[in-house]
Each structure stands twice: as C-alpha cells, then as structure tokens.
Amino acid sequence: DTPSSSPPPSSSPAPASHLIGSKEDIVKAGRLIKTVNGCREILVLYHQGTLHAMDMRCYHAGGPLQHGDIEEFNGRLCIVCPWHKYKITLAEGEGLYQAVDDPTVKPLRTHWRSKGVKQRIHKVTEVKGSVYVTLNDCSEAIESDVYQTERYRTGSIQA
Ligand code: FES
C-alpha cells in the first residue's frame, strides 16, 4: 500500500468537513454563524452538551435562527424562529405545529404534529477540540435551501 491509499487516521475529520472553530469558543458563545463553501450560511449551536448545525435562515421566510430561543415541545428540542415563532427540531429540522383535534369541540384540544423535514440539518463532528461541519448533501430539496441561493442574496426572493 502506498501512503496515499491508506485510510485517513480516525482522529482526522472527513475530507468534506469544514472547520468552524474551537469547541471551547462555540461553547462560550453558545451560537456561531459560519459561511461554508463560500456561500452557505450555517448556524452552529451548543445546547445541553450537544452541538447542532443547520441552515441559518428559517425555512418559512428566511428569519435569523441565531436569535431564536430553544425550547422543548412534545419532548423534542426546537429552535423557535424569532420572526413568526415557527418551531424547528434541532436534531432533524422538522417543522412542528399544534393541530386542533376537532374545531367543533370546545374547549379546543390540540396535539403536536410534524410537517416533515423543512430545515436542512448538517453533521457536526469534534476532533481534538476543533469543531467541523459536513454539509448535508441530500439531493432532495429542503425548504430552507431557497434562502441559501444567489436569488435570495441578490434580493429576487423577498423574505
Ligand atoms: Fe421563521 Fe417566519 S421566518 S417563522
């Protein structure tokens, strides 16, 4: 085996991963935004001992998720968008909402439902105190993708 064909040592990040910063700094800051691949704005956050990464702009209308509160709904941790309070699960990027069981029955009874994955979640890894993000390259469109496009940045899509 030549050295170039050897697998990388397990302590190295995957080749497609992007350095975000030191874990210590992210833990201190709680949240950090980084532009990855020259164009994708990623929010990396640290909450209750876990690092998460997702598209920074909310799938609904491009709200700045870095200013959202983190709360638990139906046992799932969500970031709450500061613009219209949409709830997005940290782990999967699902949009959660409260559905009314039967609008004719008073008082109204509701339960939590998922709209499916709406926000693109990315993979975070930590190697020797440094934090890396690997972009989620799932080819299926996810709604938050639209706010990562040139059309959005140049103002052709209004938030
Ligand atoms: Fe996030 Fe509307 S932009 S809830």
Image (tube, grey):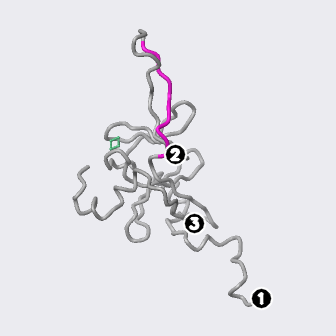
Tag 3: amino acid = Ser
- Whether residue 110 appears in magenta in the rendering, the answer is yes
Q: Position of residue 139 (x, y in %)?
A: 49, 60
User: Which residue is painted at 50% across and 28% down in the image?
Assistant: 112
- Does 93 appear in magenta? no
Q: Which residue is mark 2?
A: 90
Return the x and y of residue 66 as percentages of the image width and height: 39, 50
Looking at the image, is 106 positioned above or below residue 59? above
Dot 1 beta carbon under 8 Å from ligand 1: no
Single out the residue that lies furthest toward the bottom: 2
Residue under label 3, please give it: 130
Q: Amino acid under label 2?
A: Leu
- Judged from the image, the secondary structure of the residue bearing numbered disc 1 is loop
- In the image, 60 versus 21, the foreground residue is 60
- Dot 2 and dot 3 residues touching (CB under 8 Å): no
Label 1 vs label 3: CA separation?
A: 30 Å
Residue 56: % across, % down:
40, 54
Which comes sooner in the sequence, label 2 or label 1? 1
Q: Secondary structure at mark 2?
A: loop
Q: Nearer the viewer, mark 2 or mark 1?
A: 1
- Circle nearer the viewer, 2 or 3: 2
Q: What span is in magenta?
A: 108-117
Count of number-bearing discs = 3
> What secondary structure do most residues of the magenta stretch adopt?
strand
Q: In whole angstroms, how far apart are the C-alphas of marks 2 and 1?
A: 42 Å
The mark found on residue 1 in the picture is: 1
Residue 100: horizontal and vertical position, in percent? 44, 21
Given the image, on which type of amino acid does mark 1 rest? Answer: Asp
Quadrant of residue 11 in the image? bottom right
Which image quarter is the N terminus in? bottom right
